[in-house]
Image: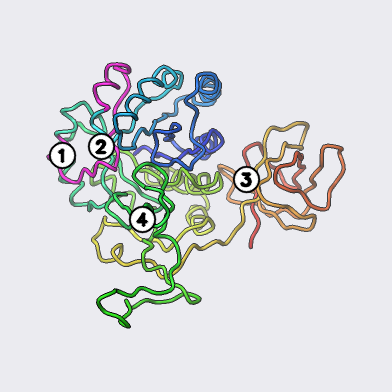
Amino acid sequence: MELLSPAGSIEKLKYAWLYGADAAYIGLQGFSLRAKADNFANQQAEAQKEADFIRSIKGDKKLYCALNIYFHNQDLARLEENLDNFAAYPFDAFIISDIGLLPLLKRRFPNTELHLSTQANATNGEAVKLYGDMGFSRVILGREVSLSEIETMKKAAPHIELEAFVHGAMCLAYSGRCFLSSWMTGRSGNDGSCAHSCRWDYRVLEEEQRPGEYYPVIENEGFTTIMSSKDICMIDHLKELRDAGVDSVKIEGRMKSIYYAAVVTRAYRKALDRLEGAEVPDFDGYREELNKVSHREFSTGFYFGKEDVEKSTEISYEREYTFMGSLGEEVEPGVFALDIKNKIRKDDVLEFIGPDELYLEDRDWTIYDVFGEVPEEADHGKIYTMRPGIKASEGYIIRKKK
């Protein structure tokens, strides 16, 4: 199976591929359901610059472009104006939910595959066959389908690739068709600007016609996560997905950090390699790393039934580690450019992780400022270099236990 990882920016794309993804999916500014992600440019000069860099690191990896908002007439007009800029990127497929885009994309990009977005809610075999007849080579399944339903869908249309989410956030609504964020903040999840209101902590829930009668909740420090769904985690069930007919397993999270993208991608890479018979030393350690990135309670979604996923999580985010930064280019032997994300203090005990390095604890690192001096602390937004006290490489990620 293909491992497909999120990339909300050029930086995240680099780390997704570096840490084991076969393919990555990105959005373009103004046309993606993750409007708050950095996304990729649609201006010609910027697009060409980004595209050139992507080609330099792409190799045999795949790159998919999400054009998955619901298009109004003015959106279609903007899309047509930007098609030449899109052509700069080495896209292997477009991910769309609006069927109105089909003629436009087929005409302009006749050799680029079309993947049906999960927002289209394909949940049965007849729908998969119909979309295949329209020209889609892949259907990204609605999160609401079970393993047995996937098996039936694959038998109905064996020539159509099926993609399924295996890790990350799930929606309170049916695959994102929700107005809660729009009601509460004026930011609609259906045009890419969801405020994730369902993830917030709430104090009480009382219905007007039943004054004094409160919805039963389990409170956490005085608040409840009654509307927050559990995260999905299928790392222990990849064989079942493969046997059901899934061709690509997808990690959610274009708005999350490179730390999240790297750690989660790496764990699923190891799991898929192991599924194919490869020896994976420390696999349990890589699997356990999933608990070291920010997440809510894990579930298996709808794959084995509805009972678990239809209950809200009883806790908010779990955060065991803080993402401190990453190592860039090696500027001299053993010294690397430092991309710092959170303040690092002189006495911090840091951990370094790599694509094939579970983690290394380091107490003997040294950071240098632009004058070659060793500061007491290093802040985000400033320029530094770093000499790790352990053997490290460009692309290693730095974290600290909270």
Of the numbered discs 4 and 2, the one sitting upstream in the chain is 2
Q: Amino acid at mark 3?
A: Ile
Give the structural element (helix, strand or loop) at label 1: helix
Of the numbered discs 3 and 2, the one sitting upstream in the chain is 2
Q: Which label number is shown at residue 183? A: 4
Q: Residue at x 62, y 45 (%)?
A: 397
- Packing grade of label 2 (10 A; few <14, some 14-19, many >=20) is many
Residue 141, placed above or below residue 146? above
What residue would you read off at disc 1? 127
Q: Which label number is shown at residue 397? A: 3
Give the structural element (helix, strand or loop) at label 4: helix
Of the numbered discs 1 and 4, the one sitting upstream in the chain is 1
Residue 262, placed above or below residue 299? above
What residue would you read off at disc 2? 139
Of the numbered discs 3 and 4, the one sitting upstream in the chain is 4
Give the structural element (helix, strand or loop) at label 2: strand
Which is closer to the viewer, label 1 or label 3? 1
Q: Amino acid at mark 4?
A: Trp
- Whether pointer 2 and pointer 1 mark residues with C-beta atoms closer than 8 Å, the reply is yes
Alpha carbon separation for disc pair 1 and 4? 31 Å
- Packing grade of label 1 (10 A; few <14, some 14-19, many >=20) is some
Q: What segment is highlighted magenta in the picture?
A: 101-129
Alpha carbon separation for disc pair 4 and 2? 31 Å
Q: Residue at x 49, y 41 (%)?
A: 37
Residue 316, placed above or below residue 59? below
In the figure, residue 181 lies in which quadrant?
bottom left
- Whether pointer 3 and pointer 2 mark residues with C-beta atoms closer than 8 Å, the reply is no
- Report whether 333 appears left or right of 76: right
- Whether pointer 1 and pointer 3 mark residues with C-beta atoms closer than 8 Å, the reply is no
Horizontal and vertical percent position of residue 373: 87, 43
